[in-house]
Amino acid sequence: MEPADQPPPISVLDPVSSAWARTQALLFGSFRFGKWLAVAFCAWLATIGSHEVSSAINAGMGKILKDGSARDVVRQFDQWLRNNAEALLTTMALAAVASVVTGLLILWLTSRGRFMFLNCIARDTGAIASPWREYAAAGNSLFGFRLCVHAVSALPAIPFAGVIGFTSYRMLRSQSWTWLDIGVIAGCVVGAGLCALTFLAVEKLTKDFVVPIMYRRRVGAPAAWGELGGLMKRKLGPVVLYLLFQIVMQAVLATITFAIVIVTCCVAGMPYIDAVILLPLLVFDRAYSVCFLEQFGEEWRVME
C-alpha cells in the first residue's frame, strides 16, 4: 500500500518569488499608467499614515533648555502653566477631539482600502469604484474590530503613561531620584512595551491573514479570526516563523523605502505620491502574506 502524499512543507522563502511574480504581472505585465495610478490609490487608501514623512521642532522650549538650568526650566514651566492654564486646557481638548475624529476617519478608510488593495492584487485589476461598494460590509466589520482592538490596547497605556509622566516630573522638580523611581519607570516602560507588542501582533495578523480570509470566505472579522485561530492551533510553528521572518523583511523594505525617500528629496514621503513611487514594494508586501497563506491549502487560496 502506497503512502499518502504528504503536503509540501510551509516555507517563508517560497512566497517571496511568488509575490514578486504577482507584482510583476500586476504592474509590469501589461503596463498602463492609469492602472498604476489606480492601484496606487488603493494602496494609499490601505496604508494612510504609514509612509508620510513629518517633523516638528519646538524652538521656544529649546531656548529655555539652552539658557537655564533644569530647576529654572521647572520654575518657568510652572509659571507658564499658571498663566495659560485655561487656554492650554481648551487647546488640549480641541486637539484631542480633532485627533480622535481624524483617527476614526483614517481607521475607517484604511479598513475599506485594505480590501480594495487586496482586490487589485487578487484579480489583477485597477478598479476603484466597484470594490469600494462591494466590500463596504467587510470594511465596516474590519473597522469595528480594529476599533475595539485599539480601544482595548489604549486602556493599559493611559495609566502607564500617567505614572511615567508623574514620576518623571516629580524627579525633575525635586532634582533627585531614588531606585524606586527608576524601578517604577522601568516597570511601566516594560509593561507598555509588552502591551504594544501584543497590539502590533494582533494588528499584523489581522492585516496579513484576517483580511484575506474575510475576502475569500465573505465573513466578518470575528469569524475570520476564529478560522485563523483554528489554523494557528494546527500550524502554530509556521505562523511564528512567518512573524519572525517579517521582522527581517520589513526591515529590508523600510531601508529601501528610506533610501528612496532620501534620493527623491522626501518627495516619496508625500501623501499618495509615496504610494505611486513605492507601489512595487507595497504590492510585494501585500502579495507575500497572501502567497504564504495559500500554502496551507486550496481552501485558503485568494489569487484568481
Image: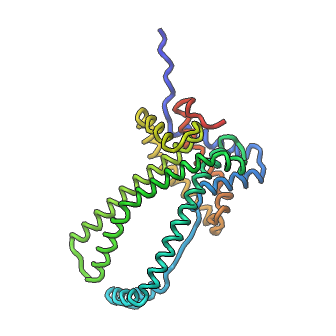
The tally of labels here is: 0
- Residue drawn at the location 29% of the way across and 68% of the way down: 185
Residue sitting at x 51%, y 52%: 144
Measured as percent of width and height from the top left, residue 3 is found at: 47, 14
> Which of the image's four quarters has the C terminus?
top right
In this rendering, the answer to whether 187 lies above or below 33 is below
Q: How is the image coloured?
A: rainbow
* Residue nearer the viewer, 215 or 245: 215
At x 56%, y 30%, the residue is 299
Q: Nearer the viewer, residue 68 or 94?
A: 94
**Residue 25, image x, y percentages:** 70, 42
The front one of 199 and 186 is 199
* 253 sits left or right of 276 in the view: left
- Residue farthest to the top? 1
**Would residue 209 be found to the left or right of residue 41 on screen?**
left
- Give above or below for 300 relative to 100: above
Residue at screen point 37% across, 56% down: 195
The answer to whether residue 299 is left or right of residue 29 is: left
- Residue 302 position, x and y percent, is 61, 37
List x then y, in percent, for residue 278.
64, 56
